[in-house]
Amino acid sequence: MIDKGHKKTWKQGKEMLVASIDGCSWMYDGHVLQITIQKNDGSWVQRKADKAFRVCTVRDFDRLCKRPVKFNPCVRPGCKHTWIDKEGGYTNREGMCESCFTARMRANLDQELAQEQDDKKARDRRAYAKGMRFVAVIWIHASGDDYSVEMLQNVMISNDHILRVLRNRRSRVLNDWTVYSLSKEGNRRFVRDGRNMKGDK
């Protein structure tokens, strides 16, 4: 039986490749040997043996690595990088190398965060116009995923009011909250938070 930490490094053309055994190979009884071959930019392909991991040897591992990896050119104009062909497996890279795909994802995330900030400022401006002057951002840690709620008031929000919200929603943590003052421009200014409170009771 091959050791689950077994790896192999080799050079194909100008690219350095590393093959390692995927965790699913030994985590699930009867699962076949599955490896990931990766180059240094993170591009990868998975290959599977035709027999269970528990009976595989280094020779089976080497056999999966033996077939040459195919490198495809990035579809982005001007980019000279390549990506590893998935050999029929799923990919959401749309023909881009890892660098271009990551750059696009980062740009999309930055755009989404900027839009989220604009939306929040617009909501705060509307709240201010209606007479609201303070907002409490309260994180609920109950069963399931954590989530936040926002409480708006025209006067300072008291600790007791925040604690009632937390207890009504059965939060296990009672000090994960922050109070801000609002402005007509939609900006928030820190007032206080719950970090100095004893938070789990």
Image (cartoon, rainbow, N blue to C red):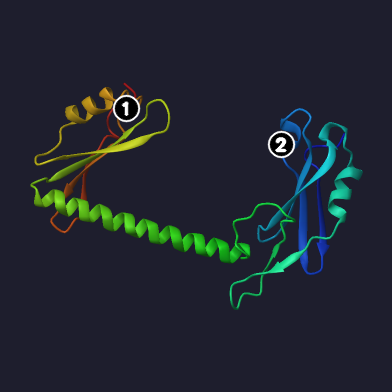
Distance in Å between CA atoms under marks 1 and 2: 39 Å
Sooner in the amino-acid sequence: mark 1 or mark 2: 2
Quarter of the image holding residue 122?
bottom left
Please report the residue visible at 71 percent of the width from the left and 67 percent of the height from the top: 72
Of 199 and 2, which appears nearest the observer?
2
Of 33 and 157, which appears nearest the observer?
33
Residue furthest bottom in the image: 78
Crowding at dot 1, Cα within 10 Å, few <14 / some 14-19 / many 20+, comes out as few
Return the x and y of residue 188 as percentages of the image width and height: 21, 51
Per the image, label 2 sits on a secondary structure element best described as: helix
Query: Where is mark 1, residue-wise?
Result: 199
Please report the residue visible at 60 percent of the width from the left and 60 percent of the height from the top: 93
Side of 91 relative to 127 (left or right): right
Crowding at dot 2, Cα within 10 Å, few <14 / some 14-19 / many 20+, comes out as some
Question: Mark 1 is on which residue type?
Answer: Gly
Return the x and y of residue 146 as percentages of the image width and height: 39, 34
Per the image, label 1 sits on a secondary structure element best described as: loop
Return the x and y of residue 32 as percentages of the image width and height: 80, 37
Side of 154 relative to 28 (left or right): left
Query: Where is mark 2, residue-wise?
Result: 24
Residue 51 visible to the viewer:
yes
Please report the residue visible at 59 percent of the width from the left and 72 percent of the height from the top: 76
Please report the residue visible at 83 percent of the width from the left and 43 percent of the height from the top: 49
Question: Mark 2 is on which residue type?
Answer: Cys
Side of 54 relative to 138 (left or right): right
Mark nearest the camera among 1 and 2 is: 2
